[in-house]
Image (cartoon, helix red, strand yellow):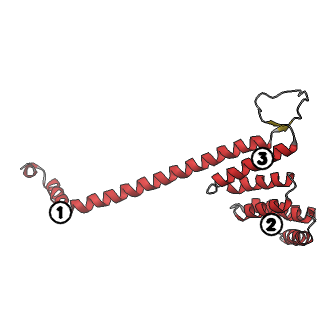
């Protein structure tokens, strides 16, 4: 046997492996499996976030698009911006549609709340304030950043305050007063200004 020609410590390792080999292989397999799962999940999350960022940037192109009435000559044509709309109504319908589908396609992304914020803005521009308030409330509930959440709470309070619905006006004023009274909030000054 070849094992008899090996040094004594190596012979002991060979004997130990023959006794515990199955356990060692199972342990190595488990460690390798967990490592592959972690790497796969990390790659999936990165791909999901990249996809959400791409969709958000594409949606912003519609948000930033120009409104150019048909038949009107346009000076300073920007050849990189191919998105234009004939009316404000067409623009905001498209913006609402793009951000809504962006949200629905990226609900598990870190940008989901921003899709809703811009969707809410497009709804405001279309005169659909009640639905916009609901979408902005939903966006605020899913925001992980407290500072960002505070500023959007001020915006939500102002939207409610500016509505013609008596209950919403009272709720907006109460929310704005609460935000203004919180000295620790980053939006404290903004809330005070709007009161």
Of the 4 image quadrants, the one containing the C terminus is bottom right
Q: In the rendering, at what x and y percent does residue 121 appear?
A: 81, 53
Query: What residue lies at 76% left-to-right and 55% top-to-bottom?
Result: 117
Q: Give SS at disc 2.
A: loop
Left or right: 74 as drawn, with respect to 60? right
CA distance separating discs 3 and 2: 31 Å
Counting residues from the start of the chain, the first of labels 1 and 2 encountered is 1
Where in the figure is residue 185, as x and y percent of width and height? 80, 66
Query: Label 1, label 3: how many angstroms apart (C-alpha)?
Result: 68 Å
Q: Which residue in the structure is indicated by mark 1?
A: 19
| Residue 168 picture quarter | bottom right
Above or below: residue 74 compared with residue 152: above
According to the picture, the residue beneath numbered tag 3 turns out to be 95
Return the x and y of residue 107 as percentages of the image width and height. 64, 56
Q: Is residue 186 visible?
A: no
**Mark sitting on residue 180:** none
- Circle number at residue 185: 2
Instruction: Give the secondary structure at mark 3.
Output: helix
Q: Which one is nearer the viewer's eye here, 87 or 45?
A: 87
Q: Earlier in the sequence, mark 1 or mark 3?
A: 1
Residues tagged 1 and 3 counted as in contact (Cβ below 8 A)? no
Q: Does 22 sit left or right of 1 as displayed? A: right
Residue at (46% x, 55% y) in the render? 38
């Amino acid at each position: 046997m070849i094992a008899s020609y090996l040094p004594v410590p190596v012979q002991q390792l060979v004997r130990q492996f023959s006794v515990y080999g199955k356990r060692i292989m199972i342990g190595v397999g488990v460690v390798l499996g967990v490592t592959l799962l972690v790497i796969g999940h990390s790659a999936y999350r990165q791909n999901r976030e990249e996809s959400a960022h791409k969709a958000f940037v594409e949606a912003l192109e519609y948000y930033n698009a120009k409104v150019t009435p048909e038949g009107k000559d346009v000076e300073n044509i920007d050849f990189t911006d191919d998105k234009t709309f004939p009316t404000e109504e067409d623009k905001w319908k498209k913006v609402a549609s793009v951000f809504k589908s962006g949200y629905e396609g990226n609900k598990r992304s870190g940008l989901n709340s921003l899709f809703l914020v811009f969707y809410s803005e497009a709804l405001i521009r279309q005169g659909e304030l009640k639905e916009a308030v609901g979408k902005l409330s939903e966006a605020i509930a899913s925001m992980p950043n407290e500072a960002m959440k505070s500023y959007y709470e001020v915006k939500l309070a102002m939207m409610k305050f500016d509505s013609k619905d008596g209950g919403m006006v009272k709720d907006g004023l109460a929310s704005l007063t609460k935000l203004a009274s919180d000295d620790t909030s980053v939006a404290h000054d903004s809330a005070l200004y709007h009161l």
